Image (cartoon, rainbow, N blue to C red):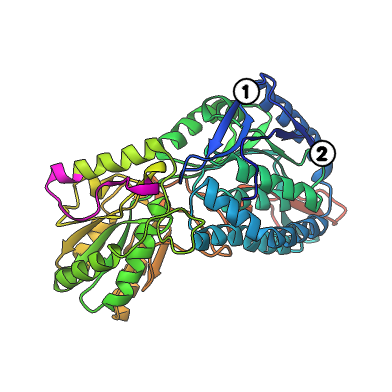
Amino acid sequence: MATTAAQAYKNFIGGEWVDAASGETFESTSPANGDAIGVFPRSGAEDVDRAVAVAKEAFAEWRLVPAPKRGEILFRIARVLEGEKAALTDLMTHEMGKVKAEAGGDVQEAIDITYYMAGEGRRLFGQTTPSELRDKWNMSIRQPIGVVGAITPWNFPVAIPSWKLIPALICGNTVVLKPASDTPALAQRFVELLAEAGIPDGVVNLVHGGGGTVGDRLVRHPDVRVITLTGSRETGVEVLKAAADTLTHVHLELGGKNAIIVLDDADLELAVEGIVWSAFGTSGQRCTAASRVIVQRGAYAELQKRLVERVEKLRLGPGWEDDSDVGPVINQRSLEKIHSYTEIGNGEGAKLLTGGEVASEGDLGKGFFYRPTVFADVDPQMRIAQEEIFGPTTALIPVADLDEAIRVSNGIKYGLSSSIFTQDVNAAFRAMRDLEAGITYINAGTIGAEVHLPFGGTKDTGNGHREAGQAALDVFTEWKSIYVDYSGRLQRAQIDTEE
C-alpha cells in the first residue's frame, strides 16, 4: 500500500500542511476489510475561510501568469501523475475498493485530461467578428472567474478532482478542494503531486471534512465565485439554493438511471459484455452505470440466459487481488441501501434471476460486498427501474420494438448516459437523435467517456453545464467582449443614422 496504517494527515492551505483549527479528526478505512488508511482533519468553517482567503490572494497573481506557462505546469503534473500511476492505483484499490484495472483507468483519466487541458494553454480561443461600423474591430476573450470550490465524490477519487481542478487551473482560477470523506487519502496524494509538480502556493488548497460543515461553508462563502459539485440530485438542489444569495456560478453533475437498449438484431455476445461491464464495473457505483437493460422481446430469453451465466462467474474480492472482478461497495450505509432495493424489487413483483444478497462468507465478511444482482420482467414504472440504486443491480425490461424502447429509456427524470446494441444503421441514428441523454453509445455500454468530449447529462442529471472537452472551459471562464474603434470619432452602434 502507498500509505501507512493510521498515518495522520493535514489540510493543505497556502502551500503549508496544517491541522484543522478544532484539532478534531476522522479515520478513513478500507471498504474491503476495514483496515485503517489514515487519520484526517475534521475541518470547519474557520478552515474554509482561511483556505478561501489564501486562494483569493493567490488568484491576483495566478490569473496573470500567461496561459501557455500555466500549461507547462500542467504538462509537468501529467508526467508526475504518470510516474505515480502504480502507487495511486494501489492506494485506490485499498481506500476506494476498485479492482486494479478500474483503479488504473481512474488515474489514467486524470493523466489524459491534464495533458489535454495543458494544450488549451495555447488555445483558450475567443472569437473575432466584423463590426457593423467602419474603422472598428470586435473580439471576445475568455477570462478566469476567481476562487473555485470543488466538491468531489468518492467513486472516482482521482479522475473527478482532475476533471474539476485541471480545467479551472488552465483558465487561471484558484481552487479550494473538499474531497469525499470516504477517500481523503487519494485526494491528499493528488494534491501533494500537484504541489510537487510546481503549482504555486495558494493556487490549490485542500480542506478535509464533512459536507455539512466544510461543503456548506464553501458553497455559501461570498469570495467563492464558482462551485463545481458531483453528487446526488438532492445535494445538488441544496447547493443551488445555498449559492443563490451570492449568485455564485454553480456546475452540477448529479444522478443517472442509464439504460442499454438491445434490439433483436444485436450481437448478443457483445451486448452481454457491454451490460456486464456497465452494470457491474466499479460495483455499479458510477453515475453512468447501466441499471436498466431494455430488451426487444425476440432477444429477451436468450439475453437473460447468457447474462446470468456471465454474471454468476464474476468473482468478488478485494481490488488489489489480480483475479477480483467486482470489489466492495464503499460503506455499510451503501450496502444497506443496495439491499433495500433488492427487497423493493421483490416486493414489486420483479423476478430475481441472480444475486440479491450481501456476500459475507470468509474474508468477504470483513468488507462491504454485494453479489451482482439481475432482475427480470421489470415494469418501467417500478422503483428499481426509476430510482438510482448506485450498486451492482440491473433490471431487465422487455419491450416490443424500438419506439417502445426509446420511450422507456426516456421515461425517467435523469438523462446522463444511454446505449443501443443493433446492427441496423437506421435504428442507431434514430437512437442518437431521440434518446434524451447527454451521452449515447452505439454497440457499447453506458460507461467509458473520453476526456476530449463533453461529459454530462440532461434533465435532472445536472444544470446544463458539462465537464471535460472544450465545454469545461465554459464552466471556469467568463466571456468579455471588446470593441476597438480606431476611426478617431465617436461612432454609435445600434443608433439610427442617415448614412
Who is closer to the viewer here, 52 or 458? 52
* Residues drawn in magenta: 345-364
Q: Position of residue 2 (x, y in %)?
A: 65, 50
Q: Tell me the mark number nearer the camera, choosing from 1 and 2.
A: 1
Q: Position of residue 103 (x, y in %)?
A: 54, 57
Residue 419 appears in view: no
Q: 64 above or below 326?
A: above
Residue 253 appears in view: yes
What residue is rendered at 19% in x and 66% in y? Answer: 304
Q: Which residue is mark 2?
A: 60
| Mark 2 crowd level (few <14, some 14–19, many ≥20, 10 Å Cα) | some
Choose top left, top right, bottom left or bottom right for residue 57: top right
Left-right relation of 250 to 197: left
Q: Which residue is mark 1?
A: 44
Choose top left, top right, bottom left or bottom right for residue 460: top left
Indicate whether residue 203 is drawn in magenta. Answer: no
Residue type, label 2: Ala
Give whichever of discs 1 and 2 has the lower sequence position.
1
What residue is rendered at 49% in x and 59% in y? Answer: 321
Q: Position of residue 22 (x, y in %)?
A: 66, 18
Indicate whether residue 363 is drawn in magenta. Answer: yes
Q: Position of residue 161 (x, y in %)?
A: 60, 48
* Residue ranking furthest to the left: 349
Q: 199 above or below 129?
A: above
